[in-house]
Image (tube, grey):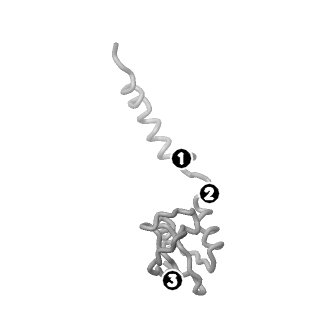
Amino acid sequence: MGACHMMVAMNHEENARCCVCGWTDRRSLVGVVLIGGAHATLCGSHALMHRESAATATSEFELRRLLRDRRARRDRRCDGDELGAALTAAFQNERRSGDRRDA
């Protein structure tokens, strides 16, 4: 973890929400102090992403850009890899034979 990521106790504000996704469940909201001293509110998932990230943010706008971009990236699960393709091919017949019912 390269940067200092500090969490602060949340004051349960009436309209508190995660500045990245808009989540409003106060039980999962945390306050974080950004580089330069600015404060931001994050849900537990985005707080974890922020804490594990090597990138730093100085504003809510930068925080949204850093954390939201991760979700907007191309889904690598669709491409697969050589091992995944080999495993799928090896077990393809096994899965199909289990789906067929004997009459």
Q: Which numbered disc, 2 or 1, marks the residue that appears first in the sequence?
A: 2
Instruction: Please give the name of the residue rendered at 62% of the width and 53% of the height, measured from the top-left corner.
Output: 74
Q: Which residue is mark 1?
A: 80
Instruction: Please give the name of the residue rendered at 64% of the width and 68% of the height, measured from the top-left corner.
Output: 65
- Front residue of 86/71: it is 71
Q: Look at discs 2 and 1 and give the one toward the viewer.
A: 2
Q: Which residue is mark 3?
A: 4
Q: Which residue is mark 2?
A: 73
Q: Secondary structure at mark 2?
A: loop
Please determine whether, in this image, residue 92 is positioned above or below residue 11. above
* Residue furthest to the bottom: 36
Q: Amino acid at mark 3?
A: Cys
The C terminus appears in which quarter of the rendering?
Answer: top left
Q: Are there few (<14), some (14-19), or many (20+) residues within 10 Å of tag 2?
A: few
Q: Amino acid at mark 2?
A: Arg
Marks 1/3: CA distance?
35 Å
